[in-house]
Image (cartoon, coloured by chain):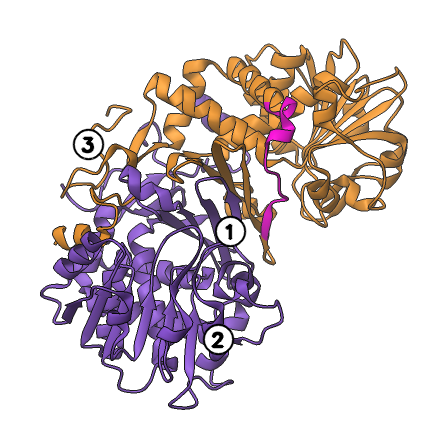
Chain colours: A purple, B orange
Amino acid sequence: MNAVIEKPIAATNAAPSERALIPFVSVDNMMRLVHRVGLETMLKELAEVIEGNFRRWESFDKTARIPAHSAEGVIELMPTADGDTYGFKYVNGHPRNMRAGLQTVTAFGLLADMHTGYPVMLSEMTMLTALRTAAMSAMAARHLAPKGSKVMAVIGNGAQSEFQAVAFKAILGIEEVRLWDIDPKATEKCARNLRGTGLRVVHCATAEEAIQGAQIITTATADKKLATILTDNMVGAGVHLNAVGGDSPGKTELAKEILLRSDIFVEFPPQTRIEGEIQQLDPDHPVTELWEVVAGRKPGRTGEAQITLFDSVGFAIEDFSALTYVRAKAKETGLYDLLDMIADPDDPRDLFGMLMRAK
Amino acid sequence: MNAVIEKPIAATNAAPSERALIPFVSVDNMMRLVHRVGLETMLKELAEVIEGNFRRWESFDKTARIPAHSAEGVIELMPTADGDTYGFKYVNGHPRNMRAGLQTVTAFGLLADMHTGYPVMLSEMTMLTALRTAAMSAMAARHLAPKGSKVMAVIGNGAQSEFQAVAFKAILGIEEVRLWDIDPKATEKCARNLRGTGLRVVHCATAEEAIQGAQIITTATADKKLATILTDNMVGAGVHLNAVGGDSPGKTELAKEILLRSDIFVEFPPQTRIEGEIQQLDPDHPVTELWEVVAGRKPGRTGEAQITLFDSVGFAIEDFSALTYVRAKAKETGLYDLLDMIADPDDPRDLFGMLMRAK
């Protein structure tokens, strides 16, 4: 089967106009795209696109994501726009899904032309979110982690863990990852997947062992509760904390005392104050917006003993960046299908006539 | 070509699990569905589903839609949820599109299972929005218009006009529609499309002529400005106004004086105060929520001389209703495709392994 379906899906009666057919990047095509580009190259390029958009942060419409909570989890919409292009992501977070054999996080996203309102691409984003989250973490660490970091602890060895490890290798030059998870099977899976990546992989029996000698500590656990993956005495001077798992109200990973000893960097404060580790702190606790560091307006790491914390929750501009990147690559490679998603009669006022003629 | 693609779109390497394949209702399948069910039957059934959900209004999460404005128009996300099912619509409004041969309004929507966060249907909604808007108007008029209304004026003969006419015939028993548009070609198109529907269609040379003898006046114009389609002296006692076109900030159709003489019924006040005709009034001007009328808590029409106004802007619960209706009908008829939209590895923590095995 060809990657590109020449005949639009399910459009038979009348040929829809070009604008009515929306390029769609399926899971299968996303995976092909990653392998066509190369995983490490793609992570690097994603980090660059994200960094470029963080540099022009002020040109985006920004809003905290719009959540719908249920007992089991949350469904969120994350829109943003830069005046020319509009993008949004649909994403869920259902920590108990894993027990039912389902993904904790699934996602898809869309780009549209703001001048016409017509969608220009629909894409899977479960895979893409894993890639952009890892690229984002590594981009932040490039500004915040100790220079020459070679060792990273990875606490929580679930779906995000390998992406983090490979992104930090590709973008920061990390050589060793020290893995720990409450479930040893997760660690085995992570270690197995990282074989052949060129990383030195160390299984650890405890979180304490994992952080030994690490300049960077990544936490990526998924429980929907106020957890304490790292306690105060575990975190020494000079490390960079990359806290990925705390990303919704009531879901944190770090002891409050660690936060009080750290310089905290965030994506979009109104969202992070609700969802991030800093939900444990006073609403006016000082934090630095990462885009200001990227744009050269504020310092990142300032000293050897400093503990830096990237309180990552994921922001719409990162998804926008990932979608625009994939749109360009999909065009280049032809790795997309066409969806008959927009009704577009020849006479725009004649939607009814289009319907009647289809009889 | 069969309506149902047995082989999922673009999923070749590994068979995705059932949950990972999202039923998709294309424009073509939506049109087939309308004809399979029958246009008038579908409008009636849509009105019933919407009415049922208005009756249980309090069981829904409600939020004003989330807009992204540009010089040319607006893109909006409209989410809602009832604890079990989540739905949202993407919709744009770009009045100038028509001049470029594009639809003013295009839309698509999604339903998801709140217990897992997994999408369960993606659907075109340009056609479906036209249908649900007309069904909604007629459902509201059933509670508000004079009993035995037979004549309706339709001011604005664009893409929404025929759907309104047919819905009011099917649901209220309207026999005559009196058409007027600033562009005579739009009226010609509307009249041509309504041939064979059983409606008596009268072309009118002015708005004044159109409203003669009409018990119901529908306004459905699309200019993004504060327009005055109806002036105060044009609207006599006892009519029902179905104002469909005023639906975003700075976009209204009726003279303020008419509003002050009317009893006003709205969908969701926090949204209508921003987007509806009542944006012209004080923020505390009394309005009745239509769901309270539907649920029997508040009266609809109370007297013969009363002017009732349904200040329609469209609300997420109407789209939710339309999507759940289409989901059931698509299942019944098989009129859908399957999209490879959700990455769903056998081991949910092994997204990376799924990616690597696809190489």
Along the polypeptide, which appears first: circle 2 or circle 1?
1
Q: Which residue is mark 2?
A: A264
Task: Judge whether B121 appears above or below B282 on screen.
Answer: above
Of tags 2 and 3, the one toward the viewer is 2
In the drawing, what numbered circle is on residue B26? Answer: none
- x and y percent of residue A355 in the render? 46, 25
Of tags 2 and 1, the one toward the viewer is 2
Amino acid identity at mark 3: Lys
- Looking at the rendering, in which quadrant would you find the C terminus of chain B? bottom left
- Left or right of residue A358, residue A216 in this image: left
Helix, strand or loop at disc 3?
Answer: loop
- x and y percent of residue A173 in the render? 22, 79
Q: Residue at x 22, y 44 (%)?
A: B345
Say yes or no: labels 2 and 1 on the same chain: yes
Q: Residue at x 27, y 25 (%)?
A: B4
Q: Which residue is mark 1?
A: A116
- Residue B280 quadrant: top right
- x and y percent of residue B209 in the render? 80, 24
Say yes or no: labels 2 and 3 on the same chain: no
Q: Residue at x 15, y 41 (%)?
A: B12
Residue B35 forms part of the magenta stretch: no
Q: Which residue is mark 3?
A: B7
Q: Which residues are magenta?
A: B53-67
Q: Work out how far the residue at label 2 is from the one at label 3, CA to CA, in angstroms.
A: 49 Å
- Residue A20 quadrant: top left
